[in-house]
Amino acid sequence: MLLLAAALLVSGQRADSVRIDRRELAEYRLTTAEFEQFRKASARIAMLIADDASFRAEPLFSEEITQSADVTEASAALEARLRSHAGLSEALTAAKMSPRDYTKCALTLVAARLALGFLDSGALKAVPPGAAADNVAFVRAHRAAVDETLTDLAIEIR
């Protein structure tokens, strides 16, 4: 039993050290429980961002992250920053959320919110069925809370 627990722990650590790939993000679906956990962590992170001048020079959610053409690079950069900054790491620990899960939720929320904006403006006619459509529907249903959370994190959605 002890060997099994150790093997699961080691395999979990390996999974967290592997970069988030396009497929993992494409298959990720937003849920109410995960979004609430994200909001809890984000409230702490937003306070930290407001109080720490270093985030004015280097925002947590820079354009390179929120508008990157390479989601694997963007996710790696965000996850690394969440892991390496003591305050960010503490905020996630307090919210019982891993840097990896926070990264997936954040990038998915931004993408789904952008897609919703494109749909609402008519620039996009439809979203492919599956996780993408489900995530856009989730954001539509929780739009006020999503917008508030993204604004608190200084993420501009145009």
Image (cartoon, grey):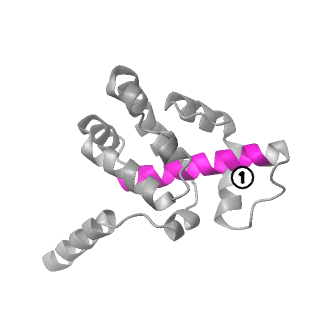
Residue 99 percent coordinates (x, y): 36, 51
Q: Which residue is the extreme one toward the left?
A: 2
In the image, taking residue 23 as reference, residue 124 lies left or right, namely: right
Q: In this figure, which residue is indicated by the disc labeled 1? A: 137
Tell me, yes or no, if residue 37 can be seen here.
yes
Above or below — where is 115 with respect to 88? below
Kind of residue indicated by mark 1: Ala
Q: Nearer the viewer, residue 151 or 135?
A: 151
Above or below — where is 153 with respect to 112? above
Main secondary structure of the magenta stretch = helix
The residue range painted magenta reads: 99-118
Q: How many discs mark residues in the rendered view?
A: 1
Q: Nearer the viewer, residue 126 or 133?
A: 126
Number of residues whose C-alpha sits closer than 10 Å to that of mark 1, classed few (under 14), some (14–19) or many (20 or more)? some
Can you say which quadrant of the picture contains the C terminus?
A: top right
Residue 8 percent coordinates (x, y): 25, 73
* Residue at position x 69%, y 52% in the image: 136
* Residue at position x 38%, y 51% in the image: 77
Can you say which quadrant of the picture contains the N terminus?
A: bottom left
* Residue at position x 32%, y 27% in the image: 54
* Residue at position x 73%, y 47% in the image: 116
Residue 94 percent coordinates (x, y): 31, 39
Residue 107 in magenta stretch:
yes
Secondary structure at badge 1 equals: helix
Tell me, yes or no, if residue 98 can be seen here.
no
Residue 76 percent coordinates (x, y): 38, 56
Residue 8 in magenta stretch:
no
